[in-house]
Amino acid sequence: MRPFYTFLLLSLFISCGGPAKKKEVAAEPIPTKALSNAKEATVPFPIYDFDGLEPLLHASDGKTHIVNFWATWCKPCVAELPDFEKTYAEQKENGVAMTLVSLDMPTMWEKRLVPFVKEHALRGEVVILDDPKMNDWIPKIDADWEGGIPATLIYNNSKREFYPHGFTYEELNTELQKFLN
């Protein structure tokens, strides 16, 4: 019986590639591989790292910008989107622009995000933030933000306010009026 177990262990060791192959696999950085695979996804939205997104957070074009950070897997985010869409439709003529920054994971872009945007006919500009260095970019958006979503930035040329919480239609419009008046 002992030779059988020895043979079995030896077979498993050889079939797994031994220690040399295990080191090779472990040496390949998993996040880099995941990001390179994610970049191959075809989606109809711009995909930004934080440096690419940052200009959208500081436009000085005379408009009032609503920038909402959300994800399809976030129930409070999804619940507030109709209120954002309604507000945007009502205020677009008053110089309001809306950007919906998806924080969905790359594996969700094609199978979840794209169908969600189509199904809900989102009219705000949808962009994807794909930057794993959250500890670097979250404080650049707001020093007190802990990274929870939904979260919203509203700004224009003269005022800037960050809201680390969800909104109802009435709350969003109340805050937006402070920027439009």
Image (cartoon, rainbow, N blue to C red):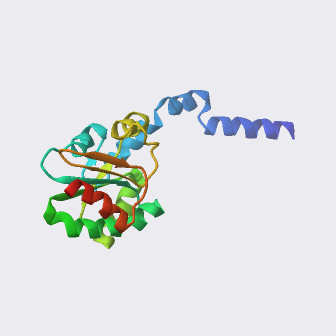
Let me know if residue 37 appears in the view.
Answer: yes
- Asked if residue 122 can be seen in this view, the reply is no
Report the residue at 20% width, 53% height from top.
64
Q: Position of residue 87 (x, y in %)?
A: 27, 67
Q: Which residue is drawn at 39% across and 66% down?
A: 168
**The C terminus, quarter of image:** bottom left
Residue 137 horizontal/vertical position (percent): 36, 37
Direction from residue 3 to residue 12 in the image, left or right? left
Residue 38: percent from the left, percent from the top?
36, 48
Q: Residue visible at 26% across and 55% down?
A: 178
112 vs 147, nearest the viewer: 147
| Rendered view: 123 above or below 56 | below
Counting from the top left corner in percent of width and height, residue 156 is at: 20, 48
Hey, which quadrant is residue 173 in on the image? bottom left
Between 77 and 127, the one lying in front of the other is 77
Quarter of the figure with the N terminus: top right
